[in-house]
Amino acid sequence: MTTIADVAARAGVSKATASRALSGGGYVSAVTRERVRTAARELAYVAHSSATSLATGRSFSVGVIMPEPDRWFFAQLLSGIQDELFSSGYDLVLYGIQEGSSERRRLFEQVLPRRRLDGILAVGIQPSAHELRRLVQVGSPLVTIGAYSEDASAVSIDDVAAARIATEHLIDLGHRDIVFLGARSDAATHAYGDQRRLEGYMAAMVDAGLEASIRHAPGGSTMPGGYEAAVRTLGDRQNRPTAFVAVCDEVAIGGIIATRRLGLSVPTEISIVGIDDHVHAEMFSLTTVRQHPRAQGVAAVGLLHRRMADPEAEPERIVMASELVARSSTAAPR
């Protein structure tokens, strides 16, 4: 097994100089640094992570916290994060733990405070559980992904604007009886992004003079949640809307399935628009407001690198673009 002493001997330098050249810590001339790195490549030397951590004071590990890494948005986000971290020499430590669970509380109260991480990327932070405050107290450079950005740098889309775009698209088609589909009724204290989208829908309705028609059909932000909420809403024949704005594409797809199973036509009788541009949106011809989760992951890692370089800098906010993608799930009301 090749050691740092072997690399130093090949490069003709001391072990301390070889260590500084490979770790980036301390001054080493550019010529010497390159000679040491060439020797390391020739000998196929790989630094032991524990030794590197002791020498540099860094773990070269970034913690990523998200609720459900198997869902489309989180999987796409994680792909961008992972590629960007690996390309910059960092390991990824993933904590995919469901919101509201005892395991998640233990993560914030016990696991993270004693874990040595160079930085933390947090997705879907819950205001009600004071998770952001707890993460700030951990002391590692922090970037959140999503709309909840108080006291921390953040990457997100403008959720209010995304929902406004979706709602105004339906209003422009002539719809007046539009229901917001999905998101918990207590989203303001649990799902900040969902609440912001509900606010965007409401603002667009008010601006169009349709405040009397504002309705929310609460449900989980999943396909089954959208299905259940749509069945409940459309089952009331006397108050059946002509259109849905879904909190996300998974809810919209659940709404499309429910509408069709009830014998109604999309978009002839019910128009549906989502937010995300989920991988299955094209399959369901879903009109949606597109966001780019993989690009958000890449941007978040870049922002975290800046935080790690200067932890005392003022928090930054990156707002990613989103745009309407018109397909055939929306049309003028019959």
Image: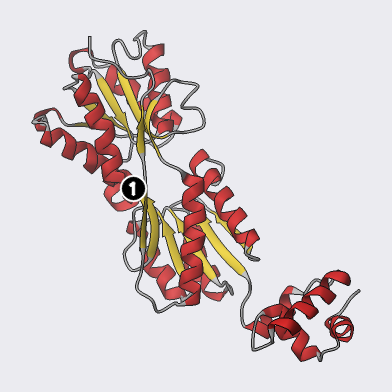
Residue 233's place in the image compared with 64, above or below, is above
Residue 228's place in the image compared with 38, above or below, is above
Q: Residue at x 39, y 65 (%)?
A: 153
Secondary structure beneath dot 1 equals helix
Who is closer to the viewer here, 8 or 146? 8
- As drawn, which residue projects farthest toward the right? 1
The x, y position of residue 139, in whole percent, is 46, 76
Who is closer to the viewer here, 21 or 148? 21
Q: Is residue 8 left or right of residue 133?
A: right
Which kind of residue does numbered mark 1 sit on?
Gly
Q: Quadrant of residue 20?
A: bottom right
The residue where tag 1 is placed is: 193
The x, y position of residue 232, in whole percent, is 31, 22
The x, y position of residue 160, in whole percent, is 26, 44
Q: Residue at x 36, y 19 (%)?
A: 329
Q: Residue at x 58, y 48 (%)?
A: 79
Residue 246's place in the image compared with 5, above or below, is above
> Counting other residues with Cα less than 10 Å from the Cα at mark 1, is it few (<14), some (14-19), or many (20 or more)?
many
Q: How many marks?
A: 1
The x, y position of residue 134, in whole percent, is 41, 69
Q: Quadrant of residue 25?
A: bottom right
Q: Residue at x 23, y 41 (%)?
A: 200
